[in-house]
Image (cartoon, rainbow, N blue to C red):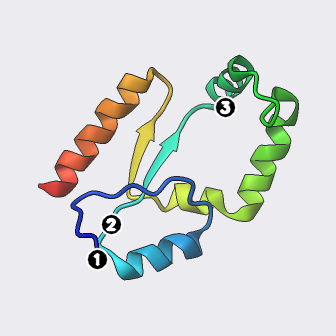
Amino acid sequence: MCKALVVFLEGLRSWPEIEFIKSKANCIVIAFVAPRAVRLTRIEQRGRADDSARHFDERDKREINYGVATCIALADEYIINSGTQKDAYLQLDEIIKSALG
């Protein structure tokens, strides 16, 4: 059995997933959020075939219908991911330090 102080799970999309994890471990939920315009610009810059600006609204609606909005609304902490990757890491570092006391 692994006994780590910090474990990251990425890609949770529904509250039942989070409830299950919280029933098994002492944890916090951190939502990474960014303004719509920032997310759209990043998608356009990536230029990936599986993630296009043309399908942006469609994907958002699908994610919302699946339950990701509940996960974001009920998160314990938030990272405002509108700057650089380093900015996001610094915010994450502060949350982890605070959680570990």
Q: Tell me the quarter of the picture where residue 54 sits.
A: top right
- Nearest the camera: 5 or 89? 5
**Mark 1 against mark 2, which lies toward the viewer?**
1
- For discs 3 and 1, the disc positioned in front in the rendered view: 1
Crowd band around label 1 with a 10 angstrom C-alpha radius: few (<14), some (14–19), many (20+): few
Q: Is residue 47 left or right of residue 32?
A: right
Residue annotated with mark 1: 1
Disc 1 residue type (three-letter): Met
Disc 1, SS: loop
Left or right side of 74 for 53: right
Q: Is residue 11 above or below residue 54?
A: below
Report the number of discs: 3
Left or right, residue 63 beside residue 70: right
Task: State the separation of the CA atoms marked 3 and 1.
Answer: 40 Å
Secondary structure type for disc 3: helix
Q: Are marks 1 and 2 in contact (CB under 8 Å)?
A: no
Q: Which residue is mark 3?
A: 36
Residue behind mark 2: 27
Badge 2 local density, few (<14 within 10 Å), some, or many (20+)? some
Relative side of 88 to 57, left or right:
left
Q: Quadrant of residue 8?
A: bottom left
